[in-house]
Image: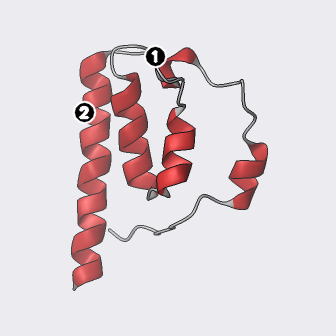
Amino acid sequence: MIYEYKTKASDENKANYVKGTTPSYYLGKYKGITVIDFIHDFELHHNLASAVEYIARAGKKDDEKQDIEKAINHLKMYLDYLKLKLW
C-alpha cells in the first residue's frame, strides 16, 4: 500500500478549525491541550495523528479496546508506508 505523506496540516484544515468546539474526550484534563493542537504542533503524518486521536479518547467516547485496536491499525499502516519509503 502507498500512503500520501504530508509534513504539515493543510491551511484549509487549520482555517476550518475553530477553538472551543473540541469535544471533551479530545481535551487534556490538566493543561487543556487539545489533541488537534498537539497534532498540528508536531506536524504528524495522518496515520500517526489518527493513532494519537484514538489513544487520547480511548475509553472516553467508544469502547476502549476498539479505540486501541484502531490506533494499532493506523500505526501498522504507517509502518507499511515507512517500509515502502525505504525501498
Tag of residue 16: none
Quadrant of the rendered structure where residue 78 is?
A: bottom left
Residue 36 position within the rendered picture, expressed as x and y whole percent measured from the top left:
55, 39
Residue 29 position within the rendered picture, expressed as x and y whole percent measured from the top left:
46, 16
Q: Quadrant of the C terminus?
A: bottom left
Q: CA–CA distance between discs 1 and 2?
A: 23 Å
The secondary structure type at the circle numbered 1 is loop
Left or right placement of residue 45 versus residue 51 in this view: right
Badge 1 vs badge 2, beta-carbon distance below 8 Å: no
Residue 83 position within the rendered picture, expressed as x and y whole percent measured from the top left:
21, 73
Q: How many marks?
A: 2
Residue at 44 percent of width and 15 percent of height? 61
Quadrant of the rendered structure where residue 10 is?
A: bottom right
Tag of residue 69: 2
Left or right placement of residue 23 versus residue 61 in this view: right
Between circles 1 and 2, the one closer to the viewer is 1
| Of pointers 1 and 2, the one earlier in the residue sequence | 1
Q: What sort of colour scheme is used for the picture?
A: secondary structure
Residue matched to label 1: 29
The secondary structure type at the circle numbered 2 is helix
Residue 6 position within the rendered picture, expressed as x and y whole percent measured from the top left:
51, 67
Residue at 32 percent of width and 68 percent of height? 1
Which amino acid type corresponds to the residue marked 1 in the rendered image? Lys
Tell me if mark 2 has few (under 14), some (14-19) or many (20+) residues whose alpha carbon lies within 10 angstroms of its own: some
Which amino acid type corresponds to the residue marked 2 in the rendered image? Glu
- Residue at the extreme front: 31
Residue at 47 percent of width and 69 percent of height? 4
Q: Considering only vertical position in the picture, is 65 above or below 1?
A: above
Tell me if mark 1 has few (under 14), some (14-19) or many (20+) residues whose alpha carbon lies within 10 angstroms of its own: few
Residue at 55 percent of width and 50 percent of height? 40
Left or right placement of residue 55 versus residue 30 in this view: left
